[in-house]
Image: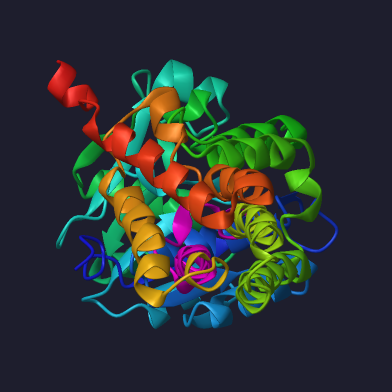
Amino acid sequence: MDQFSTAITSVFIQTGPPGTAQRRVLGRFLAERQVEFASALGAREVILLGGGTAEAVATRHRAEELGLKLREISGPHALAAVVNHADRLLVLQQNLLPTRSAFALGGEGEEGVQILSAGVGAEAGFERIDLARAWSGALVIEGRRLGALLELPEDAETAPAILRIALQARLPEKWMSEEALADGGWTLLGEQGNLAMLEDKWLARLVLPTADAPVSRRLVGKLLLRSGSRIAGNVRWISAMLAVGSLLCLGAIGLSWPGMGPWAFAIIVLAVFAFEGGIGLKRLATMPFEPGHWWQKLPWLVDLSFFASGILAPHGIWLHRIFPPLVAITLLHIARGRHKGWLGSLRDRALLAAIVAVVGASGGVEAGIMLVALLLAGLSLLPSQDQRR
């Protein structure tokens, strides 16, 4: 079970009043991103202050898409009324763009205020608490403490008021890593905030893979770094690319008969790039908040089409046709995670399918699959990075 799933029951989010700037980050409003963040932490309800804007409407729709209940309130008194005493409320400052990796709160039954050093925090636009500390824009508080809001004027700033209540109650303070401010993992976007620079940082975090990632993923990552911000919020693009990848895999299987094998494996190459592009865009659309969903399993269709095409395309008896692709797919998964750097990037399905297509055009598909199996066997026999140490 997620460590946050029982610690945070609801989240308080505030949008700006009509007429104020409403900015998007990779296709979604900041409040939508906060809803995604809270959902990933296990929150079940969104309490929204502010309405009548496109951001508020989009936030409601996003909460509904994620299965969260949403309540709209008019001020701090209403917040104290709707939160149960036993609830743990996550409070997020307006215009905050958080990430889960930088979040230091939320353990089982834990209240707390996430803080930064005063100098760094104030420079980044966060509210200074005193000469040593600044509020990072996030805290977790039990509902029983919110009764103090009723003593304040109805037009009081809600999030800062809750911060004062938390500090007066001496809730535990957790220091947040300042590295998250530098790499864009935790950002408060003020009126003068550079949205283009923030999106560039987010793109780099989300689409640039590690050095041992498949070659196709690295190529797609570079393309998304250039154009991802323009299409990240377009669900049609994402759905289209994932659908195209699936259809290409099925088409490769349908085209797999003797004499057409090289074309089938060339189509598999295209399917890999379609999946990498679709999954990369999906990652941008959800940011880093939604791990392990069904769309991450779609590349298994590539392995299925590789295996099926490897059986159907060559000539010969069934036993001879089944064995080479079975060995190749088995070795592909055995070698997974053994090597870093360029050796690890050789486990690229697009590269392997391209080898089969090129060799198959002159020497037969079976020879191409055997060559791929031989390359993967050699990669599996090489000592891993841990063994070399």
Q: Is residue 194 above or below residue 297?
A: above
Asked if one can make out residue 24 in the rendered structure from this viewpoint, the answer is yes
Q: Residue at x 22, y 32 (%)?
A: 381
Q: In the image, which residues are magenta? A: 283-309
Residue 88: x and y, percent? 27, 67
Q: Is residue 384 above or below residue 155?
A: above
Q: Is residue 363 above or below residue 238?
A: above
Residue 95: x and y, percent? 62, 48
Find residue 236 and report its image quarter: bottom right
Query: Which residue lies most toward the right here?
Result: 19
Q: Identify the main secondary structure in magenta.
A: helix
Residue 218 lies left or right of residue 380; in this view the side is right
Q: Residue at x 58, y 48 (%)?
A: 350
Queried whether the magenta region covers residue 194, the answer comes back as: no
Residue 61 lies left or right of residue 107; in this view the side is right
Residue 239: x and y, percent? 69, 72
Quadrant where the N terminus is found in the figure = bottom left
Find residue 215 and report its image quarter: top right
Quadrant where the C terminus is found in the figure = top left
